[in-house]
């Protein structure tokens, strides 16, 4: 067995998900059977202050010699970094990723990749020009569970997929929870709203089952019909969005396939905290694959075939064994004893790509990230959801 290559990460921003990601990054890859790469954190930057970056490094258990920077500009100049993980709000991804790419750094950028498709295209072009790796951090795509579901589809267990339904919602009273409208989930200046934050997971499930599983040369963009209801306070961020998609397919491949992707920050996928109903149903003529909530971090699947076969599986996220704390946009939680959060699989993929000289993620390349941004652009267009020009622009640099 060859020695694993150590990939040196820089962390851009020190908020909630940056902490969760960094803790996961430091989990020994061998606990999940990964032997080709290891991760270390060599620096973190906060736009607020250097001391915040210092506290972040300490809280997440990074090596004592990791550098703390008080600006993103300093971070991207650090010559010891192999790749930068961007964990700012959606509104800032374009400017931050451009900063990294211009400085010659490989990038793993949180979802939603950008505010719109034009920005995503501009980043992809810049990465190509600079010969750098660039990937949208849609962690769910890299879970063993997702690989299993895609394999079930391509091996034909349920026949050609006819319909997919996918939901990702949280029940809050947004007026009460985010009353002043400043939180990133509802703030238009931060590209807030259900669609870009949570709906992207519903679309991820639709795309990874109906699009990514098709041979590349036959994949076609879907037709889209959407309804968008805005959050009442700002009227410029969506609270509930429903999308119908039709993926054109030849009659030999099963004909057109349908999908319904739903999302909300007012109604939940898991009423009363129950996780016993599937949030994703992938239906074919021979049966159905069910994936249980939450859509962004599922740990249970069920294959039900019309011949009576039922195969239920559980997909733990191996980890440090201490029930480590984790975070999502709606608050803090705790992993089960012996579990990590599951963000390490996307990090392994990014690191492996660097090792192999690949410039894109294996399970969602840039063309697919751009296409999903185009779908979200169309949804916003149909729903009349427009963000401020300064965050929609492709002009770089722009002060945010
Ligand atoms: N994959 C997943 O499961 C999850 C992904 N996310 C994604 O991660 C990203 C960040 O979300 P999250 O960590 O919840 O956000 P937080 O608000 O907790 O953190 C965002 C950080 O970005 C930096 N920042 C820079 N400019 C601004 C600004 N104008 N307003 C607010 N923050 C700013 C700050 O760090 P500093 O002061 O250090 O510069 C801040 O701490 C989003 O794209 C979100 O979609 C979020 C939750 C879960
Ligand atoms: O990516 C995410 O997944 C979990 C959600 O709670 C969070 O808001 C979102 O950003």
Image (cartoon, helix red, strand yellow):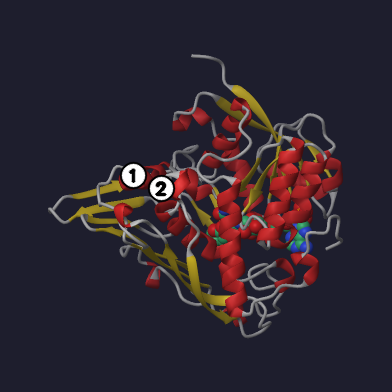
The secondary element bearing badge 1 is classed as helix
**Discs 1, 2 touching: Cβ within 8 Å:** yes
Q: Is residue 55 above or below residue 236?
A: above
Residue 146 lies left or right of residue 122; in this view the side is left
Rendering coords of residue 150 (x, y %): 38, 46
Q: Residue furthest front?
A: 251
Evaluate whether residue 184 shows in this view. yes
N-term-proximal mark, 1 vs 2: 1
Classify residue 372 by image quadrant: bottom right
Question: Residue under circle 1?
Answer: 154
State the quadrant of the C terminus: bottom right
Q: For the residues marked 1 and 2, what is the alpha-carbon distance in whole angstroms?
A: 6 Å
Q: Which label sits on residue 213? A: 2
Q: Is residue 363 above or below residue 372?
A: above
Mark 2 CB in 8 Å range of ligand 1? no
Classify residue 32 by image quadrant: top left
């Amino acid at each position: 067995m060859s020695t694993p290559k150590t990939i040196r990460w820089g962390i851009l921003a020190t908020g909630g998900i940056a902490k969760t990601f960094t803790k996961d990054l430091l989990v020994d890859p061998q606990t999940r059977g990964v032997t080709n790469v290891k991760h270390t954190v060599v620096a973190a930057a906060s736009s607020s202050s250097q001391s915040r970056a210092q506290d972040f490094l300490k809280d997440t258990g990074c090596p004592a010699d990791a550098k703390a920077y008080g600006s993103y500009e300093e971070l991207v100049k650090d010559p010891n970094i192999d790749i930068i993980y961007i964990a700012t709000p959606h509104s800032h991804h374009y400017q931050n990723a451009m900063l990294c790419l211009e400085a010659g750094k490989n990038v793993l950028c949180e979802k939603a990749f950008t505010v719109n498709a034009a920005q995503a295209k501009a980043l992809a072009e810049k990465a190509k020009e600079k010969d750098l790796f660039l990937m949208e951090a849609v962690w769910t795509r890299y879970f063993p569970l997702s690989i299993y579901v895609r394999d079930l589809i391509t091996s034909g267990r349920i026949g050609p997929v006819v319909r997919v339904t996918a939901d990702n919602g949280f029940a809050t009273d947004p007026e009460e929870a985010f009353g002043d409208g400043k939180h990133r989930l509802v703030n238009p200046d931060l590209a807030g709203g259900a669609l870009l934050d949570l709906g992207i997971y519903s679309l991820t499930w639709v795309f990874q089952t109906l699009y990514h599983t098709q041979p590349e040369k036959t994949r076609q963009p879907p037709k889209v019909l959407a309804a968008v209801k805005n959050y009442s306070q700002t009227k410029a961020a969506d609270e509930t969005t429903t999308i119908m998609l039709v993926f054109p397919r030849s009659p030999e491949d099963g004909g057109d396939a349908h999908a319904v992707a739903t999302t909300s920050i007012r109604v939940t996928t898991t009423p009363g905290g129950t996780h016993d109903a599937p949030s994703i149903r992938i239906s074919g003529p021979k049966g159905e694959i069910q994936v249980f909530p939450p859509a962004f971090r599922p740990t249970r699947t069920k294959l039900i075939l019309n011949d009576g076969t039922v195969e239920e599986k559980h997909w733990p996220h191996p980890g440090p064994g201490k029930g480590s704390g984790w975070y999502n946009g709606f608050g803090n939680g705790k992993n089960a004893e012996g579990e990590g959060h599951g963000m390490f699989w996307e990090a392994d993929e990014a690191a492996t790509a660097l090792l192999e000289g690949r410039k894109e993620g294996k399970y969602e390349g840039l063309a697919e990230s751009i296409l999903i941004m185009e779908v979200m652009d169309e949804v916003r267009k149909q729903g009349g959801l427009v963000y401020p020009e300064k965050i929609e622009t492709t002009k770089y640099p722009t002060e945010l």
